[in-house]
């Protein structure tokens, strides 16, 4: 059976779906909410601090409450990073004196998400963070 672009895309989508459902340890350095600002033509990443409790859950350092993984959370970001490209955003986040990312897998995830956000910005399609 010949390999087609459509079958390749299905295989890639399935690999991505499976890997998105694996367990990951949370970064004690915090987490990011990534979005595209189409008006400003930039990719933005809001950084939020957290503490990881003994169960491995992210906890708001001010309230001590668990931060839910889904749904809206009313918290103030600690820092806003932005860039016109994924590379520019990576430089802003990772090449500063006090990088908020403390885990390599988190850094790799952010790089992938910044690339996805850039592709959405360029193609004028909706970006939804994985």
Image (spheres, grey):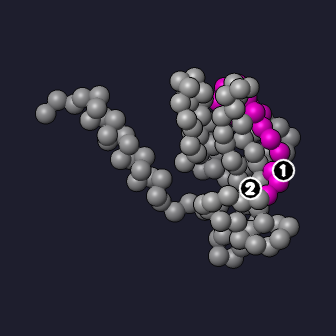
Other residues around mark 2 within 10 Å, as few (<14) / some (14–19) / many (≥20): many
Residue 30 image label = 2
Residue 97 image label = none
| Residue 63: image location, x then y, percent | 83, 71
Helix or strand or loop: what does disc 1 sit on?
loop
Q: Which of marks 2 and 1 is in front?
A: 1
Other residues around mark 1 within 10 Å, as few (<14) / some (14–19) / many (≥20): few
Report the span colored magenta. Answer: 75-92
Which residue is found at the position 67% from the left and 28% from the top? 38
Q: Do the residues labelled 2 and 1 touch (CB within 8 Å)?
A: yes
**Disc 2 from disc 1: Cα separation:** 10 Å
Compared with 24, 110 (above or below) is above
Which residue is found at the position 28% from the left and 32% from the top? 6
Looking at the image, residue 30 sits to the left or right of residue 16; the answer is right
Which residue is found at the position 72% from the left and 41% from the top? 45
Looking at the image, residue 26 sits to the left or right of residue 12; the answer is right
Helix or strand or loop: what does disc 2 sit on?
loop
In the foreground, 41 or 118: 41
Q: Mark 1 points at which residue?
A: 78
Residue furthest out toward the left: 1
| Residue 124: image location, x then y, percent | 56, 26
Give yes or no for residue 52 being in the magenta stretch.
Answer: no
First in sequence: mark 2 or mark 1? 2
């Amino acid at each position: 059976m010949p390999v087609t672009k459509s079958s390749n895309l299905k295989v890639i989508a399935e690999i991505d779906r499976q890997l998105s459902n694996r367990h990951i340890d949370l970064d004690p350095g915090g987490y990011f909410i990534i979005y595209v600002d189409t008006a400003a033509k930039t990719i933005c990443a809001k950084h939020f601090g957290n503490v990881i409790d003994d169960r491995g859950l992210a906890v708001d350092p001010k309230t001590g409450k668990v931060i839910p993984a889904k749904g809206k959370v009313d918290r103030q970001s600690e820092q806003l990073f932005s860039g016109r490209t994924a590379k520019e955003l990576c430089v802003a986040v990772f090449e500063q004196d006090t990088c908020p990312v403390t885990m390599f897998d988190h850094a790799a995830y952010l790089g992938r998400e910044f690339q996805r956000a850039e592709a959405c910005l360029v193609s004028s399609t909706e970006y939804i963070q994985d």
